Amino acid sequence: LGMPAVPTKLADRRVSRKIQVGSVAVGGDAPVSVQSMTTTRTSDIGATLQQIAELTASGCNIVRVACPTQDDADALAVIAKKSQIPVIADIHFQPKYVFAAIDAGCAAVRVNPGNIKQFDDKVKEIARAAKDTGTPIRIGVNAGSLDARLLKKYGKATPEALVESALWEASLFEEHGFGDIKISVKHNDPVVMVNAYRQLAAACDYPLHLGVTEAGPAFQGTIKSAVAFGALLSEGIGDTIRVSLSAPPVEEVKVGIQILESLNLKPRRLEIVSCPSCGRAQVDVYKLAEEVTAGLEGMEVPLRVAVMGCVVNGPGEAREADLGVASGNGKGQIFVKGEVIKTVPESKIVETLIEEAMKIAEQMEKDGVTS
Ligand code: SF4
């Protein structure tokens, strides 16, 4: 009897071990975290910290910085200390920077075994240094830099090759009693990437860092990442995510957060429910939705605002939302919690919605409703 319950999530999370990346737990029952990477020269401490501050403000949980030179390694200590969010040093090629990053107090170190020469000889020392300081290691396997041995064995970066590489590197650490590890197996093709993560998820209990590498410019990269992460997260796979875009890193964070909010893996904040418009629209819906979105940007309360172009579906949707407008005859009916509170001329719709949204947000904040 009655309506079936609305599912609040798609699947139980895969059971993974929990590791601690500075103040942020990854894996186990920890919320799926959002990461990004700075694009500044890491050695430019001021610019890097400025970008980290912007990322922090946009909701980024963990930030990664590249460390290709000694100057970058030298900058890590100040950056790790002054950053408001945990800093992961990203190391390719040079084991000595792994030690430098650990000494600098970075919250974790990402190594790409395929790119670190003589890596196998250094694992014992890295494991000891990381263990002594409680620094987790991310084994970051990338299709583009797959171990030559595995490339030869598989012919190309297949899911099996990526997974074998990751598990092999993990086993080298395990031999030295080190298991404070998370793993990524990135590929630019979402289908290969999803298959690789599925196999990896079944083969180990390490927390997994999801990423579609070289996903492309903002539009394509957003779609690729959303599709791939959506497939995996809906199966409970994935403990931390990084959307890679050829766009400013703050954009990556916005997309990452939106993916998690869409799957109810993160409490929703402001949500604009706007119709696609059609031949019945009696107002410019695109413009209205854009203006309302811009006017409410940065709002932290979980407010649902409906912007509907006509009175066919309009009042119904607007009633379901905290606040909404249904347009008709050059006017907008403004709804708050299902009640029409006023009817305003089209030119006043945006300012009225923003005004009412502010009032509701204020009340929500007073009542302690935050996302
Ligand atoms: Fe068309 Fe009205 Fe539906 Fe918007 S709300 S898509 S204008 S029918």
Image: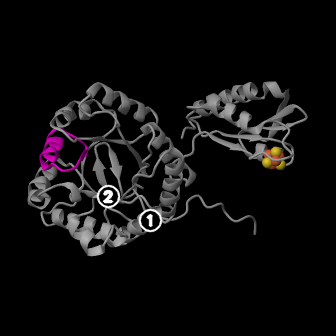
Q: Quadrant of the N terminus?
A: bottom right
- Provide the residue span drawn in magenta: 90-108
**Residue at point 27%, 62% (across, down):** 146
In this view, which residue lies farthest toward the right? 329
Kind of residue sitting beneath label 2? Gly
Kind of residue sitting beneath label 1? Val
> Any magenta on residue 258?
no
> Any magenta on residue 102?
yes
Residue 40 seen in render: yes
The foreground one among 232 and 31 is 232
Describe residue 134's horizontal placement relative to residue 55 as left or right.
left
Residue 204 seen in render: no
Pointers 1 and 2 in contact (CB under 8 A)?
A: no
Q: Tell me how the rendering is colored.
A: one colour
Label 1, secondary structure: give it: helix
**Residue at point 84%, 27% (across, down):** 344
Whether the residue under disc 2 has CB within 8 Å of ligand 1: no
Would you name the residue on which mark 2 appears?
144
Would you name the residue on which mark 1 appears?
194
Q: CA distance from mark 1 to mark 2?
A: 16 Å
The foreground one among 43 and 334 is 43
